[in-house]
Image: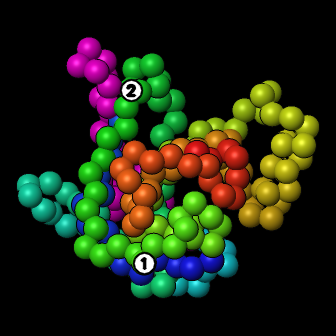
């Protein structure tokens, strides 16, 4: 696994809906509700700082052969009322593009994961057993499925491809 080298500026996330529905704004990183995410086998972590730019708050992530993340759990969100996710991002430096659709090339300067709770009633016996094993290894319950948005160095905007590691992420 190669690790991202680069810098991400201006990542803002919020859930939104149509004008008739409700909008939920996620507070900026560094405030209540955000949690660090470190990967067990990766020693160096991305450095995160917050700043003000163009009249709004931004998250600055700086990575040099490192990886980590920031989480903001949202429980009880009614997706019928808040069905859209919007954010802005800007990169100062991307990555040298490999085959980003393969396991060896699955490395991006920026990603946004949207994860959903595991629903055991919809899972097979094998999926439930695999989740119990994963929880034992990692010490916590993993999401059931996820959507992943990446800043690609080689793929066109709007391109879609399956996650090379798992079918539960798209």
The residue where tag 1 is placed is 96
Residue 134 place in picture, x, y as percent: 79, 57
Say which residue appears at 67% left-offset and 79% top-offset: 41
* Dot 1 alpha-carbon crowd within 10 angstroms: few under 14, some 14 to 19, many 20 or more: some
Q: Is residue 53 left or right of residue 22?
A: left
Question: Is residue 100 shown to the viewer in this render?
Answer: yes
Residue 99 place in picture, x, y as percent: 55, 68
In the image, the segment drawn in magenta is 16-38
* Magenta segment, prevailing SS (helix, strand or loop): loop
Question: Is residue 47 shown to the viewer in this render?
Answer: no
Residue 107 place in picture, x, y as percent: 52, 70
Q: Is residue 61 magenta?
A: no
The earlier-in-sequence mark between 2 and 1 is 2
* Dot 2 alpha-carbon crowd within 10 angstroms: few under 14, some 14 to 19, many 20 or more: some
Q: Quadrant of the N terminus?
A: bottom right
The residue most toward the left is 55
Residue 55 place in picture, x, y as percent: 8, 55
Q: Quadrant of the C terminus?
A: top right
The residue where tag 2 is placed is 82
Say which residue appears at 32% left-offset and 25% top-offset: 17
């Amino acid at each position: 696994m190669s690790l991202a080298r680069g810098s991400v500026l201006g990542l803002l996330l919020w859930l939104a809906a149509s004008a008739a529905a409700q909008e939920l704004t996620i507070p900026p990183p560094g405030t209540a509700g955000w949690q660090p995410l470190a990967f067990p086998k990766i020693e160096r972590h991305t450095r995160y700082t917050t700043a003000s730019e163009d009249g709004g708050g931004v998250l600055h992530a700086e990575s040099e052969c490192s990886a980590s993340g920031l989480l903001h759990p949202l429980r009880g969100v009614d997706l019928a009322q808040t069905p859209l996710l919007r954010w802005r991002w800007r990169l100062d430096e991307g990555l040298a593009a490999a085959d980003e659709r393969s396991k060896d090339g699955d490395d991006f300067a920026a990603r946004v994961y949207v994860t959903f709770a595991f629903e055991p009633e919809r899972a097979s016996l094998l999926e439930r057993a695999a989740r119990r094993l994963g929880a034992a290894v990692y010490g916590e319950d993993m999401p059931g499925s996820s959507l992943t948005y990446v800043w690609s160095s080689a793929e066109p905007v709007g391109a879609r491809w399956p996650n090379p590691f798992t079918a539960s992420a798209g």
